[in-house]
Image (spheres, helix red, strand yellow):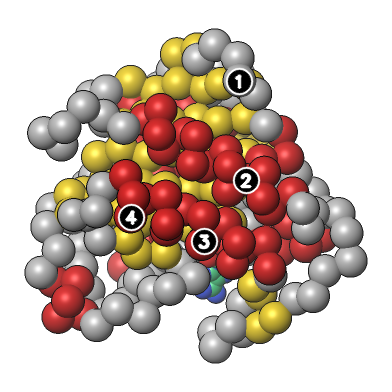
Amino acid sequence: MSQPLPFDALCDLAREAGQATLTWWNKPLEVMAKTDDSPVTAADLAAHRLITEGLNALTPDIPVLSEEDADVPLETRLSWQRFWLVDPLDGTKEFISGTDEFTVNIALIENGQVTLGVVGIPARDEMYWGGRGLGAWQRQGSGEPRSVGVRRAADPLVVVGSRRHSTPDQQALLDRIGARRRVETMSVGSSLKFCQIAAGEADLYPRFGPTSQWDTAAAQAVVEGAGGRVIGLSGERFAYPTRDTWLNPYFIALGELDDATLAVVLDQPAASSGT
Ligand SMILES: Nc1ncnc2c1ncn2[C@@H]1O[C@H](COP(=O)(O)O)[C@@H](OP(=O)(O)O)[C@H]1O
Ligand SMILES: [Mg+2]
């Protein structure tokens, strides 16, 4: 971006939206089904409204695309050189079930790549933000930001995966790694998994199941700012091309792996699958 990076304003916005979601957290909640049968709640919609209004005020010239208002014609989107990509509440099923593993996600996409992102974890009053070549930071409450970075994978390798969506391909990769070294697996909801890699708490997040572009963009920016990578199954940097679907292909987020483990991760029989 040519303007100064708007991280302070984005963090304020994500925090405000996150606090709004907590109004409905751990309380009786009406759950509505969207056309794709995924759940949506008043909390998703309140966060969506706050973030959309805030971004429109902050950068009136940059379009906003949110999961909760994604019905924008492809020809309009093809004319966008950059746009804000928002998942106002990622991990809606976690939110509904009362765990704290849900996030607020705001990313900037420029020419099909994510350049910066902010991930709020409302129930922990925690925030991560960053971007490739910029750095990555974490903040607790209104405390001082601290710089975060990926770790060099130790023993055991810590692999994070979805609480609810796993696939045989993912398990096959874990088995191949497990044949060579000790692996500890953790099931975690939402984009929080990327933040664990950025913070040096986990090493690998293979996702061989469906996600949409808004689920991953902001958190990819945090991982990349922290020195990690998010790659497609051919090893290329994970990108956000404008297409007639929001669905992502499969991907792998990783910190700093040793060469032997990296070779197993990059040698993907599942590479032909995905969208
Ligand atoms: N069948 C499917 N199609 C598209 N996205 C899916 C999906 N199943 C799960 N997801 C995505 O996975 C996200 C949850 O991630 P995880 O399983 O890692 O906790 C959901 O985010 P939302 O909660 O924002 O809908 C949803 O977008
Ligand atoms: Mg989501």
Front residue of this view, candidates 178 and 209: 209
Image position, residue 233 (x, y; %): 32, 54
Q: How many marks?
A: 4
Q: Are marks 4 and 3 in contact (CB under 8 Å)?
A: no
Would you say residue 212 is visible in this rendering? yes
Q: Nearer the viewer, mark 4 or mark 2?
A: 4
Q: Which residue is mark 4?
A: 56
Q: How many C-alpha atoms fall within 10 Å of the one at disc 1: few (<14), some, or many (≥20)?
A: few
> How far is the residue under mark 4 from the one under mark 3?
12 Å
Circle 1 — which element? loop
Front residue of this view, candidates 54 and 254: 54
Task: Determine which of the numbered discs, if any, sits on residue 48 in the image.
Answer: 3
Say which label, 3 or 2, has the lower sequence index: 2
Say which label, 4 or 1, has the lower sequence index: 4
> How far is the residue under mark 2 from the one under mark 1?
14 Å
Residue at the image point whose x is 32% and y is 44% from the top: 58
> How far is the residue under mark 3 from the one under mark 2?
10 Å
Circle 4 — which element? helix
Residue at the image point whose x is 65% and y is 23% from the top: 141
Task: Determine which of the numbered discs, if any, sits on residue 142 in the image.
Answer: 1
Q: Nearer the viewer, mark 4 or mark 1?
A: 4
Image position, residue 37 (x, y; %): 61, 84
Task: Determine which of the numbered discs, if any, sits on residue 18 in the image.
Answer: 2
